[in-house]
Amino acid sequence: MTETISTAAVPTTDLEEQVKRRIDQIVSNDPQLAALLPEDSVTEAVNEPDLPLVEVIRRLLEGYGDRPALGQRAFEFVTGDDGATVIALKPEYTTVSYRELWERAEAIAAAWHEQGIRDGDFVAQLGFTSTDFASLDVAGLRLGTVSVPLQTGASLQQRNAILEETRPAVFAASIEYLDAAVDSVLATPSVRLLSVFDYHAEVDSQREALEAVRARLESAGRTIVVEALAEALTRGRDLPAAPLPSADPDALRLLIYTSGSTGTPKGAMYPQWLVANLWQKKWLTDDVIPSIGVNFMPMSHLAGRLTLMGTLSGGGTAYYIASSDLSTFFEDIALIRPSEVLFVPRVVEMVFQRFQAELDRSLAPGESNSEIAERIKVRIREEDFGGRVLSAGSGSAPLSPEMTEFMESLLQVPLRDGYGSTEAGGVWRDGVLQRPPVTDYKLVDVPELGYFTTDSPHPRGELRLKSETMFPGYYKRPETTADVFDDEGYYKTGDVVAELGPDHLKYLDRVKNVLKLAQGEFVAVSKLEAAYTGSPLVRQIFVYGNSERSFLLAVVVPTPEVLERYADSPDALKPLIQDSLQQVAKDAELQSYEIPRDFIVETVPFTVESGLLSDARKLLRPKLKDHYGERLEALYAELAESQNERLRQLAREAATRPVLETVTDAAAALLGASSSDLAPDVRFIDLGGDSLSALSYSELLRDIFEVDVPVGVINSVANDLAAIARHIEAQRTGTATQPTFASVHGKDATVITAGELTLDKFLDESLLKAAKDIQPVTADVKTVLVTGGNGWLGRWLVLDWLERLAPNGGKVYALIRGADAEAARARLDAVYESGDPKLSAHYRQLAQQSLEVIAGDFGDQDLGLSQEVWQKLAKDVDLIVHSGALVNHVLPYSQLFGPNVAGTAEIIKLAISERLKPVTYLSTVGIADQIPVTEFEEDSDVRVMSAERQINDGYANGYGNSKWAGEVLLREAHDLAGLPVRVFRSDMILAHSDYHGQLNVTDVFTRSIQSLLLTGVAPASFYELDADGNRQRAHYDGVPGDFTAASITAIGGVNVIDGYRSFDVFNPHHDGVSMDTFVDWLIDAGYKITRIDDYDQWLARFELALKGLPEQQRQQSVLPLLKMYEKPQPAIDGSALPTAEFSRAVHEAKVGDGGEIPHVTKELILKYASDIQLLGLV
């Protein structure tokens, strides 16, 4: 078995002695470090009693004067082949001195003061930690403002709740998060100044983003000053100094918002005296060492501020990681060569993965694993970390003992374990209470969980404490503040600890019994235990986990009947229980991380007599942890080592093992299953895999086989593990010729261009050459191929074409994913079974006459068809309707490239084979998100209108880009061969106007109507009110599904013999029919819905009511998409995008009632209500 992390471990006490010797040795031979030793005179001056905060900072920054204070990665501006100027990082750092930092702060403070910002005003901050961020933060302290750092990962609703509470005058945002900032600024009337930092006007994309923000604010009627921080610096240097702020030690200067597990933002108040404490003292070490620190933790967390201010308080230099996603971490840290590093578990995992990957690559015959591992650790320590780390710590979440041991053996320094909180500051270090700042503590019994101060061998209970650095309370939350202090003034930490000795504590549990897993997910274990005891095989269950692991374990006591039945074959019992737990989780719609990965089968029940149950027959968690904890932790270690070894073995043996075996074993290793339980015909999605785990599986298979395996291939309903293996085999042998994201755009592309999407990268040269002379279809359309026919719009397109062609003996081919034609046909048939017998009978009659379902996949080469079927379609089909797509608003463009881009190329290949067949292509309004409204034209060339696209993690970025790329390829095909194309971009496709039960139950509109009916509350208006507080006219842009399909069929499929046209399938009417109108109609019809005047009050009550729904209704409600309603929408009466071409085409084709796009009617909305009831959604 390969050794992984335990080599060259040294006892901590020996490491401490080594470090003391190394400090003297390194400092004496390293001029940079020697110049950064703390100076006693500065330390004494800064720590003089009762100094005002500004004086503390001034003395510190002027005292260390010309020393380098902050280091930022150097860069240069480069212009690419496309003419765009971008930033290119250089292999070096530039620094700002302490004096320069103070001068920057003075200049910014003067500039802000000149703009009317005053002592006590609030400044919201949003961005990744950087020199600019530190500068504006110090400037705020110089001026006397209150910093409100916002978490970059928070939702818009959470941010806006904080802004509503604090009402900032200034919103400071980095260019990276500028769009998110403006979303909040538009909802925050108090903001007068938008300060943009980390901004470079020379970079085209940044300059354009800033210009777009200014235009957006102007169009919204907001008179806000938008100023780059560099402009404020320049302007402020020529202005008089701002007046000094109040010296009142209790004046508020910082709010750090924390949500805990409840999600309710609470702002911990930091007055001047408490902020001064952060600037005066280090926390994780008492060693006097020269400090070269690494900063990457957010300033919205206490740990990020402790890292920065701890370095500066000792006269050191704080260097910043260049990228917010930490992609440059190892490159940066090698340049920095830090002396101090504060790690978080995520970064420790990155280091370990780097070590493990190098170890796997370096295994050689004749050399022991421990020798290789030690050599690699030396290389990482000396080269990656620069060879002079003298102090290291871990914070923010517990680190497993294995990882602690690994890091200490790697860095050869003790890894300090820090525990603290936003409210109390630092509490203990390596389990030893820190006095100061802690002045007193006590443990309090938690009887409901079985923790008592009388426990043996160590007292256990909730930790409560007093501290010199205790916060005074939560901002504007007196009741919440009172609740976290007991009658004696001790702060209730909510953490259960064991007292191993005086001032020596160990973390055990949370009072509220909510467990935070390593990936940040919270799980309520008691809720899970209640669910799993519903299994017919489970008598009792104890769910176990810790914050160092990303999955759960359990102890399961089977029912007596099950134990008796399997008394002679106990090995057969565990798989049955596992299947049963999986079924319970599926029925309860639990998340994958809420399912125990493995468990211990216990044949002896938990009893009161055994001490595992309380008198009330409740689980005594401490006793259960004492009884089973060692075995469960051993199981964790076994599973981790087993997974690592399995993955290493897979990578080593991939070249010699059958591909299917490796694919199966990789899925088992990733999902924590047994390979023997996975048959070749099982699908990844049936194993509990979702789009994110499929993404992990995709990357794992790519690393093993060195070929791309898109998520679309993995999650296809037609693809089992054997099909995934066949895909890989085709890629490895070269029989698969489909391009990939990397081959078209470049592996790490963050910008994609229309010029990169040329047909010769997708299709054979001979085919493209022949296409120029191919004869077009000239006869009336008699045979149509429809893809995606079982989708929401696809079903109506299939039905509409059947209605057109069946009377004349025509034919509709429906390409549906499925293991075979029968399975594909069953999937299509099912979408017409909604409880409306008229629809079912109508479809079946037409299908019997004119429908042929073909099992295939537009994401596969040749659509996944045999050559015989392909040739038949190439010869027979007169028109292709491509409505199929992998619709996923989470996956990146690279993962959607195969089905949605290469898949469209396959459609083009069919269209230009044998005969030139017109193509109807279903795109999305989402392509407009990167095109300014003023430049968006309905029927213009998308290659010109949107010549390049950004790849980012914005909502549905990958999907919108993939549909744009499809449009580009179709334009290319039209230019090449005159391929007739009709593109339709839809927004909200509503329910069918006639057939009952036909709703798109997963779309936001259906969820919204259902949620309004379930909760019975609606806002006075879903839209912004006018100046007098009255409801405004607005418009909902939706088109019924049957009209959408009919118009696409009429415009895109009848008499289309040439040309390329694009249509925006929207509802353009200025009719005042809006969400508010829909609520009016529902109330008039007798549905009990109460309107709440205050929008925020409605939203809070609405969310609370949705969370209180039964599990199934909650999952089907709008709750997962509630971000859509974070704030009232702008009141726009009409469509935001042009629809003139679509309106004209509808009129000419005489679609619907008189050739007019229909309004949303009262009858349709009331049909929604009745259909929702018919489907059992309320």
Image (cartoon, grey):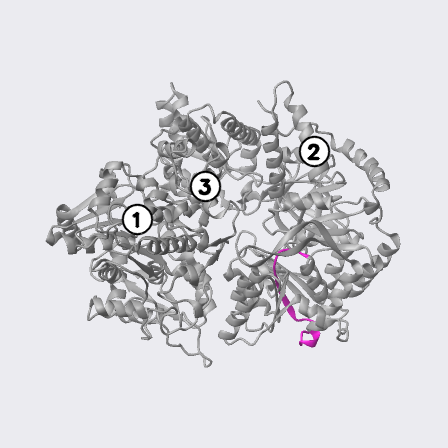
Q: How many marks?
A: 3
Quadrant of image for the C terminus? bottom left
Which stretch is magenta? 113-130
Residue 697 numbered tag: none
Circle 2: element type: helix
Going from N to C along the chain, the mark reached first, 1 or 2, is 2
Tag on residue 693?
3
Residue highlighted by disc 1? 771
Q: Do labels 3 and 2 touch, CB within 8 Å?
A: no
Q: Is residue 161 visible?
A: no
- In reply to whether residue 22 is colored magenta, the answer given is no
Image quarter of residue 509: top right
Q: Position of residue 152 (x, y in %)?
A: 57, 56
The crowding category of the residue bearing disc 2, from other C-alpha atoms within 10 Å (few below 14, some 14 to 19, many at least 20), is some
Circle 2 sits on which residue?
379
- State how far apart marks 1 and 2 are (Cα): 57 Å
Q: Nearer the viewer, mark 1 or mark 2?
A: 1
